[in-house]
Amino acid sequence: MLRVVLGWHGLRLLSRMCFAVCPRPPSCSASITGRRCSRLVRLRRATDRCRMGTSEPLGRGREDGLADPAELLPALPGPRGQTVTSGSRDESSGPRLMPLLLIKMLNKSRGKILGVLALFLVMVWYSIYREDRYTQLFYFPVQENKTTCPLGEVEKKAAQLIGNYTRDHPLFLQLKDYFWVKTPSLYELPYGTKGSEDVLLRLLSITHYSLPESIQSLKCRRCAVVGNGHRLRNSSMGETINTYDVVIRLNNAPVHGYEQDVGSKTTMRLFYPESAHFNPKTENNPDTLLVLVPFKPMDFQWMEAILNDKKRVRKGFWKQPPLIWDANPEQVRILNPYYMEVTAAKLLNLPMKQPRKVKQVRGGDGRSPCSPLRGDVLPTGPLAVSSSALSLQKPTTGLLAITLALHFCDLVHIAGFGYPDSANKKQTIHYYEQITLKSMAASEHNVSHEAVAIKRMLELGLVKNLTYF
């Protein structure tokens, strides 16, 4: 638009300049003949072209009353003392007339030139203004999907909830602690390794304990602990969960077929023998850490037999674990029982000492108190606690995973935690199977106390819930 307007005004100005600079030469008369007449004819035609078709004649008798500029010039001396008038000058005097005519035209058109210049400046300003307004209204810069890392916030808030909070303990058991220097443990499993050192020594010789370099090198570890609760179904949280640096999953919860709701990324998967998936490669990434949560000495024996291809252990489990478990030993880790101790003693106020012989009491559905529901979800309302003694209660794998994340992550978010209301006994518990709340009747977990612990974390801002709790 600016170019069109300026071009039109420039064309008008140029035509006016030609009108003033290019006066029509006189016509041939009886006194002008021969070569001079032919030159005047050619000059007249060129001037007509310069005037761009202007129909107004110049010279005496113009309708606008203006005299021909050539008539205003004084007579010039000619050859041999003859005086050449304006009507008899030849074309050789044209170049000398050009500067005078141009100066006179500029003086007369000074106002118009200033007006055109002012119009040009206004059009330039308006063009820049419109472009800036367009940028402000319709240009949206791409925002980086980065969350400001609250370094130190988790440690500060966790110390308010967990007594003697520290990050000095390793996440996984290491061979050197049982080979070079035998560190005595105060508790038996699941809160310590007392009495299981020999089998643990053999197991640690074929597994690893370190975190992947991709996690260790992170300046900010953003973690998501994904429970197995029904509230993940139709939640469309998959893409959000995949954006976290560390994604912790529980037990044998499937991923394939539920990616839209639960995501597909798995950094760690906490499990115990009864909850192990028969083929860990189907529901995990190739680099997923398979973290064994030992609840009893038989869990170590099962893992050792599987990895060394020895005779399978069949007794001592409330449910037969997989007899074939195709996993890479380099991806297997043994969770440090210290975090089970912290979860039980600091968050749930459970006693550490366990009776040596406990009769396995099975519920009406054939499940033992150590049910596969361990660690999946937590209730929102009061839930009847098992009649087992308080010393039999153990933390769920879900609360244990949150405790673990609080000891090495800089940001902890949870998803898929929470049971349906206790009065709704037909509502399924998991997002992937049809087990109802009735199945928890024989569980040895005090899920009501665990719900209170997580709500306390939410109130302190220690964790953030991605799904309603």
Image: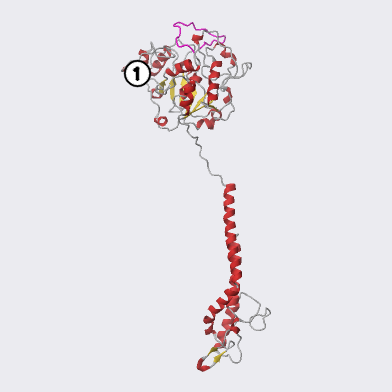
Q: What stretch is highlighted in magenta?
A: 350-369
Observer able to see residue 299? yes
Quadrant where the N terminus is found in the figure: bottom right
Compare residues 383 and 431 and report the one nearer the observer. 383
Q: Residue 25 at x, y = what percent?
A: 59, 83
416 magenta-colored: no
Q: Is residue 248 left or right of residue 5?
A: left
Horizontal placement of 207 versus 233: left or right? left
Residue 406 in percent (x, y) is at 47, 24
Q: Position of residue 190 (x, y in %)?
A: 44, 14
**Magenta-drawn stretch, dominant element (helix, strand or loop):** loop
| Mark 1, secondary structure of its residue | helix
Q: Where is residue 396 in the image (x, y as percent from the top left)?
A: 50, 17
Q: Is residue 353 magenta?
A: yes
Pick whichever, 136 or 150, lies toward us: 150
According to the picture, the residue beneath numbered tag 1 turns out to be 177
Query: Which residue type carries mark 1?
Result: Asp
Q: Coloured how?
A: secondary structure
Instruction: Give neighbour class at mark 1: few <14, some 14-19, many 20+ (Cα, 10 Å).
Output: few
Residue drawn 60% across and 66% down? 116
Given residues 421 and 113, the one toward you in this image is 113
Q: On the rendered structure, is 244 left or right of 47?
A: left
- Answer yes or no: is residue 279 visible: no
Q: Quadrant of residue 308?
A: top left
